[in-house]
Amino acid sequence: MPSDLRPYVGAHIVDGKSLSLDIQREVAEGVSALNERGVEVRLAVVIAGDDPASHVYVRNKERACERCGILSTRIDMPSTSNLEEMIEVVEQLNSDPSIHGILVQSPAPDGVNELAIASSILPQKDVDGFHPINLGRLVQGDSMGLLPCTPSGVMRMLDSSDVRLEGSRAVVLGRSRIVGMPMALMLAQKGSDATVTIVHSRTSEIESICSEADILVAAVGSAHMVGPQWVKPGAFVVDVGISRIEGGLAGDVAPEVSEIAGWVTPVPGGVGPMTIAMLMKNTLSATEMQTT
Amino acid sequence: MPSDLRPYVGAHIVDGKSLSLDIQREVAEGVSALNERGVEVRLAVVIAGDDPASHVYVRNKERACERCGILSTRIDMPSTSNLEEMIEVVEQLNSDPSIHGILVQSPAPDGVNELAIASSILPQKDVDGFHPINLGRLVQGDSMGLLPCTPSGVMRMLDSSDVRLEGSRAVVLGRSRIVGMPMALMLAQKGSDATVTIVHSRTSEIESICSEADILVAAVGSAHMVGPQWVKPGAFVVDVGISRIEGGLAGDVAPEVSEIAGWVTPVPGGVGPMTIAMLMKNTLSATEMQTT
């Protein structure tokens, strides 16, 4: 072995699957405690149409419910459902006291406004955290409400890795209402204290901005967009994106990034399972709020 | 005159007062149109206690109402009012169809939770834009709701100055729920398209981050904190802060910044009058929403 070759030490791969199971165990304990008081915890999942990926997601959520002792009710609707029909179903679930959490699987059928659906769910049953009142609490710096599952899963990953947020530079790539924007608010809020930059498709010099980040959260859905030259050596790189490419699934982060980053979350097995864990946690919290 | 001295060309001082009056004239036209349909526009202002500055702010708002043809109802409450008493007053105003906008002057009496008051106002009458549901719409990228007046006033100042936001770097100094956080969301959202960094008291190297900003919004309330070395030559500097110092009022931006910036908003006469103009605009919008 030539002397200039040394064993390669790559990024630490954050095991989202294992951390997700830890959280689900905690949730299961909380559910047991409610069960002992005679309270059953129930999540309703509404799915319209037969998109195969959506059905996989829903099955994964149902399985997580089983692991946590959460009962689930699945409402299948035709792909031809319109907004009124979907809101009618949501309203029945809103007024059903045996249902504590309501989730409408995305994407909604063509032409159905997802914002309108999110606003129709009772805020205290909104376990996806997409209702504007739950998003607004986040702007207020109040993190006691039901928060969007993906960014709160990312916060939990950072926390479990003992990454120092205070004084760090964080860059959030993407500005969606369900990941990018709430992620930026969570990282910037008091107690987290990162200095946060939101970058997006209209940003100039995106690569150089990303390369200054101690924490880089990529949430655009563009396969392998984030190359190694985008990443500061040692940075914590969170890969939220998921795209279908030849040969399988790809995140927003190119594989070679693990040669320069300090931590990388894998796809699959990173943010995805964390999102489901936080959904379970929200369902438990929602039930506790409704029954005490 | 020695040849190396040339006439000094400083920053353009953005005339918030004059722009505010332009907006109030537009609002007055909208109010006239409603009056012709038999609709009167009425704002209720609740003020508790006798803080002199608060009373000045309320009088300025009442005067703006007069200019716009908006009727105002002022509810004076004692400084000893508690949360329940204040919410009771808000609820009476919520259910009064002759009132279209409700504003509770800050600060609330000691021990009264301002977040709870903001949440008690009907969202469609929330002309300050502080209700979580109105803040949450902003996270969703929906800017059709009632938006917080100060950041929307700043957006209007940028717009009137023909500053190009797309591709620009914007830095928001401060992360309050009523200015910093909504300001960051507005600058980053689709259509505005700035690349936004939120910096705050826990940020490292704050000066160097600010000095990269094409648009710098200072909203901390610390007199003259932003010195010329914080500012990129030619930048648009928005001064939201207002502090009382010996000899009068001071913004967050030091006077010498006008020697390096391209635009500066003055204190007083900058963001302050714009905030009032946007309050008038929100009151008109709220009335239109409630009466059509």
Image (cartoon, coloured by chain):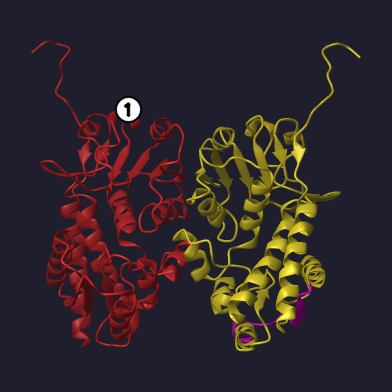
Chain colours: A yellow, B red
Q: Residue B228: x percent and y percent?
A: 28, 29
Residue drawn 73% across the image and 76% down it: A47
Q: Is residue B232 visible?
A: no
Question: To which chain does the residue with label 1 belong?
Answer: B
* Above/below status of B118 relative to A191: below
Q: Residue A25: x percent and y percent?
A: 77, 63
Q: Residue B252: x percent and y percent?
A: 27, 42
* Above/below status of B275 relative to B216: below
* Above/below status of A95 relative to B273: below
Q: Which residues are magenta?
A: A69-85
Camera-nearest residue between B245 and B280? B245
Camera-nearest residue between A165 and A266? A165
Residue lying farthest right? A1
Residue drawn 44% across the image and 31% down it: B205
Amino acid identity at mark 1:
Gln
Q: Is residue A237 left or right of residue A132?
A: right
Residue drawn 65% across the image and 42% down it: A162
Q: Which residue is mark 1?
A: B229
Residue drawn 64% across the image and 87% down it: A97
Q: Is residue B205 left or right of residue B33?
A: right
Q: Is residue B233 left or right of residue A164?
A: left
Image quadrant in which the N terminus of chain A is located? top right
